[in-house]
Image: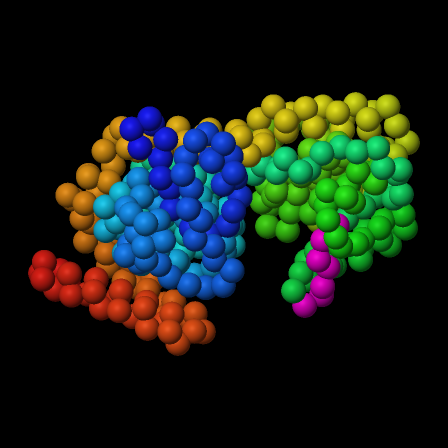
Amino acid sequence: MGDGTLTIAWVGGQFFQHGMEALGHRVVRLPLAAPGAFTWEDIVDRCQGAPDAVVYTDRSLPPPLLGVERFPCLTAFYCIDSHIHGWYPLYAGAFDLCAVSLKGDLPRFAAELSPQRVLWLPPFAEDRYQPNEAAKQWDLLFVGTVDPETTPRRSDFLRRLAGVFPGLAVTRGDFAQLFPRARVVLNIAERGDLNFRVMEALACGACLLTPRIGNGQDELFTDGVHLATYEPDNEADAARQARLLLADAPRREAMALAGRQCVDAAHRPAHCAAALTNLLRQGLDGGLPGTRLSHPDPHRARALRLLWLHWAEHCGDGALAAKYLREARLLAGAASREGQP
């Protein structure tokens, strides 16, 4: 668009889509509730014309964009679950740009794209997460799925913690409604990830007790000022920290206020939208799509072919597997024409 705003194909999760729209961008969402795949032709059809950019927002699913390395527009991957999926950096290398949620994984992505094309974009809290005057119902609250089969480490930790801290409450439901009703909100980071629950709890004005991890947490928040931390997977330390917080209401309230102010100042959808917009504009100004198209990378093509073959075997969907196989054959044919092995 001539006024500096963009038409963006927004593939995957919603995330801060509305923040992008508030900046004036035309955002066409192509949701993914289950594994699926879009070609360039699919995207042009859904957008009723070629978009300025295609952004894949992580849904923790098999790769959804076929031939993304050949798309004639700017491409970007907003990556959240890199702590779960080891193949993400390889796939990200097919894009012009990547925004990564976990700071500790930045080097893995920079090795595939170059540091200038990778942005650290920490988790955020949607605007609906706000403080309220709800009466406090629980001393220490964890909200989330707890199942020995699907979340065994979380389930085991909470079982051990309940043994040394009988006041622990565990439930499921809407974080925005439940967090303000706890004196202390407990977070668990099973894989050392700085997760969205940190931002959401703080945005609700809750006093947060969360594991002491990396991934930029100590750069965004100060232990004892914005939140309290415990040694990961150490139920005795978590219980000790919870008791200290519960014994000091003024400290809890000051910490909750400071944490909320920090999130409001830097970790809302508007902040993410502004950061991603800047990244996209840098990519356009730098001519990244043209550079990618004029210098196809045969090594990337071979790696992507193996990725498509893998997912053709493991996606569990015959129609989707056929699309992946077609893409793998196309890449094999291109390599053969170029004399590559």
Observer-nearest of 330 and 219: 330
Residue that sits furthest to the bottom in the current view: 318
**Point 29% across, 47% down: residue:** 49
Which residues make up the magenta segment? 143-149
Relative image position of residue 266 (x, y in whole percent): 57, 26
Examine the structure image and report whether residue 166 is included in the region drawn in magenta.
no
Query: Which secondary structure is most common in the magenta stretch?
Result: loop
Q: Position of residue 133 (x, y in %)?
A: 84, 33
In the figure, residue 183 lies in which quadrant? Answer: top right
Residue nearest the viewer, comparing 74 with 199: 74
- Whether 137 is drawn above or below 221: the answer is below
Query: Residue 126: x, y in percent?
Result: 61, 38
Q: Is residue 218 at all visible to an observer of this figure?
A: yes
Relative placement, left or right, of 23 versus 170 is left
The quadrant in which residue 40 appears is: bottom left
Q: In which quadrant is the C terminus drawn?
A: bottom left
**Residue at point 45% right, 64% down?**
35
x 24%, y 59%: residue: 302
Q: Which one is in front, 160 or 267? A: 267
Q: How many marks?
A: 0
Residue beneath the point at 25% across and 37% down: 288
Q: Is residue 153 shown above or below 322?
A: above
Q: Is residue 3 left or right of residue 295?
A: right
Q: Is residue 225 left or right of residue 246?
A: left
Question: Split into 4 quadrants, where in the image is the N terminus?
Answer: top left
- Residue 147 on the magenta span: yes
Query: Can you give x and y, in whole percent of width and height, for residue 140 in the image?
Result: 83, 43
